[in-house]
Image (spheres, rainbow, N blue to C red):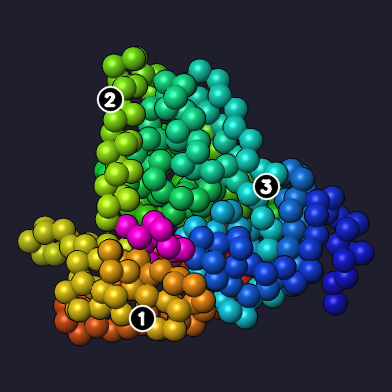
Amino acid sequence: MITVEELRQSVRGEILLGENLAKYTSLKIGGNADFFIRPLDKTDVLAAVQFFHERRQPYLVLGRGSNVLVSDDGIRGAVITLRDNLDRVEINGNKVVAQAGADLPALAVKLLRQGLGGLENLSGIPGSIGGAIVMNAGAYGREIFEVIRWVEVIRDGKLIRLQREDINYHYRGTDLHHDIILAAEFQLHILNADEQAAASQRRKDFLAKRQSSQPLNWPNAGSIFKNPPPDEAGVLRFTGSLIEACGLKGVQHGGAQISEKHANFIINSGDAKASDVIALIELCRSEVRKKFGIELELEVKLIGFQNAASSV
C-alpha cells in the first residue's frame, strides 16, 4: 500500500488524494484518482513514473484532457498531469521547442502572430501538444507531424529523444501510445507580411467553419470516431454523415447526447456520466454496422476502464 509520505520522498510537486478528474477533461466527466500529481518539471515527471513503475502500480499521464473519456469509477493508481508546470515554449528563429503540456490552440495563435506558419490549421483543435502528437492531430488537410523534427519521451523508464523518422505516424495515430511525451521541436515556415495575413485569414475561416459545424458551446471530447477509409471506389466516407444517416442525431442517454449539430460529437448536457457516453458509442457502432457494414473505430481515448499505464 503506497502512502503519501513514501511518494513525497520521490516527487517534489503537488500530490492530491482522491482528486475528481471531471474538471480536468473537456467532457467534464470522470471519477476520482487515487493519487493526482502535478510534477514541477520533466525530472519530477520521470521520478513519478519510475516510482509507480518500480512498484508495478498503474499510472496515467494526462495533458489537457480534450480527447478522453474517464471512467465513472475513476483511476486506480496515479494521474500525472502535465498541464500546469510543463507548458514552456522556446522560440529560436523558425524552430520552436514546446513542452507537452503547452496548449495547442494558444501556441498556434502565438506563433502566427510572430510570423511563423505551419500550425495555424490546428488552432481550433483543443488540447495539449503532447496529446496532439500522440494522435497525430490534424485538420483541413494538415497534420502535426508535417512540422515535427524530434520528440522527447519517457520510454521504459528512460528519457530519450526520437527523430521524426524514428516514429511510425499515420492518420490520427502514432506508435507513441505507450510512451510519455515531454516535449517536441517544430520546424515552421517564416512568413512574409502577405503570407502572414493570408494565414491569419485561413485560421479565421477554419474557426468560423468549426464554430458553425461543431457543438463548441457544450462540453465534448472532440470527434468520437475516426473517419473510415475510402470505399472501393475511392469515395471518402465521413463518420458524422454515417451516424446522421442512421437517424441518431439528437439521441440522448442520461445526460449525454449525440449532437444535433454534428453527429460525430457527443455532448455533456450537464450531468452526463461516462456510462451514458459509452451507451451512445455502442449505439452508433451498432447502427452504422447494421446499415453500412462499417466498423467504427474510436478516436476518443477511454481511460480508467482498464488498469494500464498509458499516455493520453
Q: Name the element at disc 3.
A: loop
* Residue drawn at 28 percent across, 84 percent down: 286
3D distance between C-alphas at marks 2 and 1: 41 Å
Q: Residue furthest left?
A: 233
Residue 168 x/y as whole percent: 42, 50
**Earlier residue among tags 2 and 3:** 3
Give the label, 1 or 3, closer to the camera. 1
Residue 246 appears in the picture as rendered = yes
| Main secondary structure found in the magenta portion | loop
Vertically, is 164 above or below 54? above
Answer with left or right where residue 188 lies relative to residue 236.
right
Is there a contact, CB below 8 Å, between mark 2 and mark 1?
no
Foreground residue, 268 or 183?
A: 268
Give the label, 2 or 1, closer to the camera. 1
Foreground residue, 60 or 73?
A: 73
* Amino acid type indicated by mark 3: Asp
Foreground residue, 26 or 56?
A: 26
